[in-house]
Amino acid sequence: MSSIPWTALFGDRVRVAVQRDGDPSERPGRGRSADFWHAALEEAVLSSSKPGSLEITTVPGHAPIAIAGGVPISVSFSVTAGHRACAWSRRLAVGVDLEAVTPQFENDEVDRMLQTASADEEVERIRRGLPAVNKHGQLIHLWTAKEAVLKSLGTGLAHEPRLVALRDISPSGCWTEVGGIAIDVQWLTGDGWILAAAVRRE
Ligand SMILES: CC(C)(COP(=O)(O)OP(=O)(O)OC[C@H]1O[C@@H](n2cnc3c(N)ncnc32)[C@H](O)[C@@H]1OP(=O)(O)O)[C@@H](O)C(=O)NCCC(=O)NCCS
């Protein structure tokens, strides 16, 4: 596999990559992320040490477990229409979420979804924090951040997203606190997608 361009986030403590996969109108199949990313991760994480010794264990509904050269690392995967994302870190527990930005909803539907996923004052915070972004983009920023946070914790949507209150929202990121754990979020935008990566603060 040719080298994948990884983007450094959180002061280079996290690397993320987004790759095309399949038809942009269809979400690629679930449960295949570990296979899709294995070679790229092996190259990135083990390049000069012990090639060939990356193990990724997946259990549906749980965070993937990765051991690289005998040492645990944190990895997270996400899938959206036409694209896949991966994030990894040697030190920090990381979660990633990727969403396509193709407008799929009318504005009043977006309003309803924002209200479902958020407390009222949080909707105001995201509107003030991302003034140049349209309603659909605001919803995707909010949703990717919450899902990335819940993946970094390993709970996924078993934890109520409405209870994840995003703070200090700016175009680059935000932070939140869940059960006494502070979690930082950074957003990355690309051609037709928005990605959020979340890490537990050290
Ligand atoms: C994790 C979750 C938020 C993913 O949501 P999604 O929008 O459907 O999917 P995404 O493409 O963003 O992410 C999928 C990846 O999340 C990862 N993942 C699954 N559960 C996870 C968890 N609890 N924590 C962290 N990562 C998780 C997997 O690597 C998965 O990739 P894969 O299906 O290719 O193996 C959602 O599936 C969830 O809440 N799962 C937990 C509850 C559950 O599924 N219960 C049923 C158990 S069978």
Image (tube, helix red, strand yellow):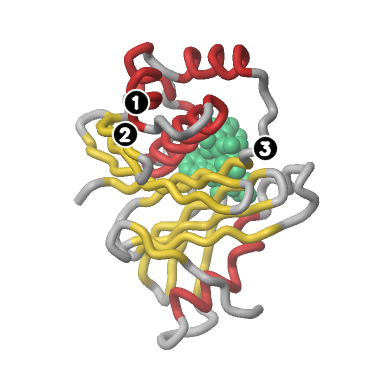
Residue 130 location in percent, x, y?
Answer: 40, 33
Q: Earlier in the sequence, mark 1 or mark 3?
A: 3
Considering the numbered disc 2 on the image, is that residue within a helix, a strand or a loop?
strand
Q: Quadrant of ligand 1?
A: top right
Q: Please give left or right for residue 180 compared with residue 74 in the image.
A: left
The residue indicated by pointer 3 is 102
Identified by mark 2, the residue type is Ile
**Residue 67 in the image: x percent, y percent?**
44, 66
Marks 1 & 2, CB-CB < 8 Å contact:
yes
Q: Residue 128 shows which numbered tag?
A: 1
Q: What secondary structure is marked by label 1?
A: helix
Alpha carbon distance from label 3 to label 2: 22 Å
In the rendered image, is residue 105 in sight? yes
Task: Describe the element under mark 3 as helix, strand or loop.
Answer: loop
Tell me what residue is drawn at x 53 percent, y 33 percent: 137
| Residue type at tag 1 | Arg
Q: Which mark is residue 140?
A: none
Q: Is residue 73 visible?
A: no
Task: Bin the neighbour count of mark 1 within 10 Å (Cα to Cα): few under 14, some 14-19, many 20 and up.
Answer: few
Q: CA distance from mark 1 to mark 3?
A: 22 Å
Q: Is residue 34 above or below residue 196?
A: below
Judging by the rendered image, the residue that carries numbered circle 2 is 169
Name which residue type carries label 3: Thr
Mark 2 neighbour density, 10 Å: few (under 14) some (14–19) many (20 or more): many
- Nearest to the observer: residue 138 or residue 46: 138
